[in-house]
Amino acid sequence: MPTRILGSLILASAAFAQSPPTSYEVARPFDSGPFTSGTSTIALSFPVEVGGAPWMQLRFARVELPGRALLRITSLRDGAVHDLDATSATQWSNTSAYMNGDALVVEVLAEPGTGPIRVALESVIVGLPPPQASICATIDDRVPSDDRRVARVLPAGCTAWTILDCNQRGLLTAGHCYGPGVATAMFRVPLSTVEGYSEMSAPEDQYAVDPASRQFQIGGIGADWCYFGCFANSNTGLTPYQREGVAFTLQIPPAFDAAATLRLTGHGYDANQPQWSNTQQTATGPWTGVSSTTVDHRADTTGGSSGSPVILASTGAAIAIHTHGGCDPTTGSNHGTSIGQAQLQAALANPLGVLACGGSWSTYCAAKVNSQGCTPVIAAGANPSFSGGPGSCVVSATNVLNNQNGIFFYGLTPAATPFQGGFLCVRGAVTRTPIQNAGGNAPPTDCSGVFSFDLGARIASGVDPRLVRGATIVGQFWSRDPLSPSYPTGLTSGIRLTIGP
């Protein structure tokens, strides 16, 4: 059976880049061919097993999911579930989240008659333990930590961390971690097995990287960085910052201070404590040098630490991205790319893809046809802006029944849940705005009503701390429809709004 090792890019340098091989890939071809869902909501089900695998990730050659069909991957070891629809499957580049164990079940969930559906599995990526290197003294000083700003990235086997950029979606890691691919960022990494094999975070804590957002440089010590962003999680609808609520501030290194202490937090290998391998650990060490491009330090690191934040202990800010080992018990230092490095600063000033700071809106989910045969339409008059003020972004619903009451409600998590003859397009905690009347023509009943909500005014008021630059919310209008043959309610489709600067 063909295999290939997924290794790191090796740099020609006196020091070494710290992103070891983490996995191998085995072929597992399966193709459902085009088909239409039958009478069961489980339209397709098949197992995937690789005996003894500590974890697996599935790579699909094709995923075709019309309508509201879902691809569901379930771990038989811990019951973790990863759901993908047509949009999120594309965001994940037709791969699954990383799933613990050696046995998975793949299912397609679809309403009867949905088609054509097609799922073609290509291969399975299987985990390996990486080697150790670069402790700066005779004792490994690292201890377990729980910094919710710090993630593990795969398949590169590196570390990344969230930053307070213009829309609070950005992460930084080492540039050489881009070589084998920064495709998934996972937070809240659990302990490894007693043998040292990595355990994977729950799918709710794994995020697909937007390839369009990535900017990077792979030029050796002092020229090694990657700036990227993630799509919202396909299970929760939240970005890493929305879920964790914290991110690093960046600081250009101040004047060198040999008495200063630096901290490094990452997901390096641990030969002494196998269950801590590739889980988050932190250590401090002295600051040993600085230039316009490089910060040198003697905090302990091992393979998997590449991309870790180098933190100035006195301020708590990140001043560099750790990229290269080199310590030995008596001499040498580890190295990182300075936050002040010119090319990195240029990238931070010009974010791409999901990191772009302009506001946007789009619709999703399906509206409920009302009792007059009209389909309500939800829209925003302009892109939402944090600085726009009242009237700058008004969300409206047209083609609704005249003279009926309704409300706009919003939250953070999109959905498409069957509800009262239509679909509830928002789930989780929601904010309900005041009741309003649609107005429109005098009776009899027609579709001349209009609802509106001034999102610009809500943002400017500061009443909702979630409404900040870069935040994405989802919302929907609910209204009365007394003559509806199912339930006396009307529902628009959902609207997704990202707040610009």
Image: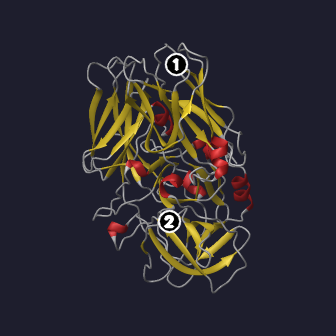
Q: Is residue 19 visible?
A: no
Which residue occupies 39% across, 70% down? 270
Q: How is the image coloured?
A: secondary structure
Q: Is residue 309 visible?
A: yes
Q: Position of residue 302 (x, y in %)?
A: 47, 69
Which residue occupies 63% across, 41% down? 455
Among the two numbered marks 1 and 2 on one chain, the one whose residue lies closer to the N terminus: 2
Q: Would residue 44 appear left or right of 347 to someone viewing this image?
A: left
- Disc ID at residue 305: 2
Mark 1 — residue?
Answer: 375
Which residue occupies 30% across, 42% down? 74
Amino acid type at circle 1 is: Thr
Q: Position of residue 435 (x, y in %)?
A: 53, 36
Q: CA distance from mark 1 to mark 2?
A: 53 Å
Which residue occupies 59% across, 48% down? 471
Residue 418 picture quarter: top left
Amino acid type at circle 2 is: Ser
User: From the image, which quarter does the N terminus lie in?
Assistant: top left
